[in-house]
Amino acid sequence: MSVHSVSIAKERLKNLLIADRMHCTADVTEQMKNDLYHAVSKYTEINPEHFSIDITRNDIHIKYMGEDR
């Protein structure tokens, strides 16, 4: 297995566990992430490559790394 396929498998498993704990499908959590991104992008100019959202059963973590200038 390549390193890339391992990271993809880990991400899929993580998303599956989150969806199971939240009692919603992976599609719903992705839609929530998209909705949060679009809500933030209404008020500030952001680059999706520097923006991440992690949703767990108890928390939502939004991280914006900023751009290199």
Image (spheres, helix red, strand yellow):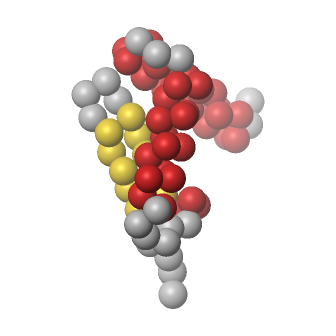
Q: Position of residue 51 (x, y in %)?
A: 48, 58
Residue drawn 71% across and 34% down?
A: 5
Is 42 in front, or is 32? 42
Q: Position of residue 29 (x, y in %)?
A: 49, 29
Vertical relation: 52 (above or below) 60? below
Q: How many marks?
A: 0
Residue drawn 50% across and 67% down?
A: 46
Q: Which residue lies most toward the bottom here?
A: 69
Q: Which residue lies most toward the right here?
A: 1
Vertical relation: 42 (above or below) 16? below
Q: Horizontal placement of 27 versus 40: left or right? A: right
Q: Position of residue 38 (x, y in %)?
A: 51, 53
Vertical relation: 4 (above or below) 28? below
Vertical relation: 65 (above or below) 59? below
Asked whether residue 52 is in view, the answer is: no
Is 35 in front, or is 26? 35
Residue drawn 59% across and 25% down?
A: 27
Q: Horizontal placement of 15 versus 53: left or right? A: right
Q: Quadrant of residue 63?
A: bottom left
Q: Position of residue 1 (x, y in %)?
A: 74, 30
Asked whether residue 37 is in view, the answer is: yes
Residue drawn 53% across and 43% down?
A: 34
Q: Which residue lies most toward the front here?
A: 42
